[in-house]
Image: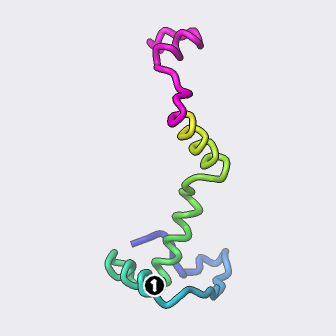
Amino acid sequence: MSGATTENDGEDEIVTVNFKVTQSFLDEIDGTWQGRGFNSRSEFIRYTLRDAIEFPTFDRDELVALLEAEEDIRKGRTMSAEEAREQFGTDGDE
């Protein structure tokens, strides 16, 4: 199902990583991988970690910018598209 694999292509050494989770979290993981068609818990965890690296969500600076923008909206510190076009000298046809 995924590109994450334990197959060794001869270039990378396969290593085992151990980590601790609560039993309730492990139960959630097991319910998720089984429900989504993965062959094993390990395959699901590799896929999830690879996906997190290849497609990160937001970094700290982006989250701070989003929070600041939300605060600007709540406090009415925004402008219309027309006001922005006037302020920055664009006609909107670009």
Task: Say if the magenta span includes residue 80.
Answer: yes
In the foreground, 2 or 81:
81
Horizontal side, residue 28 vs residue 48: left or right: left
Q: Which element is circle 1 on?
A: helix
In the foreground, 55 or 7:
55
Horizontal side, residue 1 vs residue 91: left or right: left
Q: Residue, x 54% and y 9% (percent of image)?
A: 86
Q: Residue, x 57% and y 43% (percent of image)?
A: 66
Q: How crowded is mark 1: few (under 14 residues within 10 Å), some or many (20 or more)?
A: some
Q: Where is residue 93 in the image (x, y as percent from the top left)?
A: 44, 12
Task: Say if the magenta span includes residue 68.
Answer: no
Is 75 situated above or below 63?
above
In the foreground, 77 or 83:
77
Is 90 situated above or below 80?
above
Q: Where is residue 38 in the image (x, y as percent from the top left)?
A: 38, 79
Specify the amino acid type for callout 1.
Arg
Q: Where is residue 22 in the image (x, y as percent from the top left)?
A: 53, 87
Report which residue position mark 1 lands on: 41
Assign the N terminus to one quadrant of the image. bottom left
Q: Which residue lies furthest to the bottom in this view?
A: 23
Q: Residue, x 59% and y 62% (percent of image)?
A: 53
Count of marks placed on residues: 1
Is 34 situated above or below 48?
below
Which of the 4 image quadrants contains residue 50? bottom right
Point out the stretch of residues depicted in magenta: 73-94
Q: Residue, x 47% and y 20% (percent of image)?
A: 80
